[in-house]
Image (cartoon, helix red, strand yellow):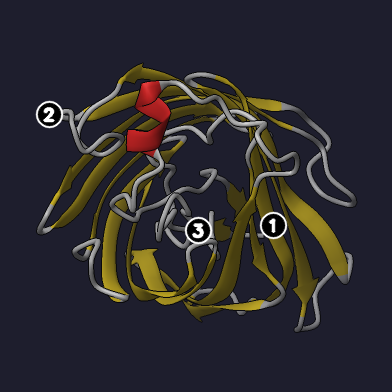
Amino acid sequence: MKRIGWAALAVVWLAAGSARAYLIDLNDARVTDPGRMEIEFQPAGYYMTLLGEEERYLIAPSMQWSIGLATDWDLLHLTRGYVRLDDADEPPYSIQEHFVAVRRMLVNGAYNDDELEGPSLALQIGVYIPGALGPDNFGSSVAILFGWGTDAGSFHANVWLTYTQYETIDVFSTVMYEGPPDWPLRPTAELYLDVDDGQPYASGLVGALLDITDDFLLQAGVRVGGWEDYADLEIRLSSFIGWDPAPGSRASDPGDEARARPAPPTLARARLAMRR
């Protein structure tokens, strides 16, 4: 398998109220509030190569959930299944991306709290787990997540360092913009560069996020990537839901009310890649 840049749903954490969802290939500099759960679900996406060896996949399903563990800490889990649509010496279905991570806020800024100024910064540490008919090895990842919220939109940047399940070193960097938080339909754009074992790969994504309610969102996007004699295309469509399982379970200090404001929408997504 060549490379399905983490994709497909990559994903963006958006916000309407305190809700955020993902559509982009990076995670945002925030954590889920204590006691709150958030789920991003893509029932099906589509991936195909444009140049190089022919590959076509139905990405079904793709899901990431997160839960707030404590103030400034959360836990997230991502899993993605791939249905091979062309003839190949591979299993017809496999789970190629299986990721568990914790996030820790290092600096709370304007992206997290209306009453604060400056950038937000978070640390993410994660483990890649063998999946069904996927890679047999474990992997590990550490990432620095940067975000800055303004009235003109949200700006994000990530740098990931990963020891992959294919026993290579991967360096992934990305930047992303999302439209103003008061727009019900917000455009998004992302660029990333991924260098795995010395092999570069560049990708661009354009999409949009639509608020249905404070805790239910729809998002869609198209991603195109490649390098030299290889190129691929991915179509993403997903939904997001957030809720508090136990009423009153979220912390109630003065800072919580500010953080739960209608915040600048943005992204979240565990950065993964399927290749070889």
Residue toward you, 203 or 60: 60
Q: Is residue 179 left or right of residue 212?
A: left
Q: Residue 45: x and y, percent?
A: 63, 76
Give the mark nearest the N terminus, 3 or 1: 3
Nearer the camera: disc 1 or disc 2? 2
Taking the image as shown, residue 1 lies to the left or right of residue 144, namely right
Residue at image position (26%, 66%) is 189
- Between marks 1 and 2, how big is the CA–CA gap? 31 Å
Q: Which image quarter holds the N terminus?
A: bottom right
The residue carrying mark 3 is: 10
x and y percent of residue 168 in the render?
56, 30
C-alpha span from label 3 to label 1? 10 Å
Amino acid type, residue under disc 2 in the picture: Gly
Residue 51: image location, x then y, percent: 45, 78
| Structural crowding at the residue carrying mark 1, measured as other residues with C-alpha within 10 Å and reported as few (<14), some (14–19) or many (≥20) | many
- The residue mark sitting in front, 3 or 1, is 1
Q: Secondary structure at mark 3?
A: loop
Q: From where the camera sits, is residue 61 visible?
A: yes
Q: Nearer the viewer, mark 3 or mark 2?
A: 2
151, above or below 43, in the image: above
Cβ atoms at labels 3 and 2 below 8 Å apart: no
- Residues marked 1 and 2 touching at CB (< 8 Å): no
- Give the residue at mark 1: 63
At a point 46% along the width and 62% down the height, the residue shown is: 23
Pointer 2: what residue?
118
Q: Residue at x 31, y 48 (%)?
A: 193
> Element under label 1?
strand
Cα–Cα gap, marks 3 and 2 = 26 Å
Left or right? Give the position of 21 relative to 89.
left
Residue type at mark 3?
Ala
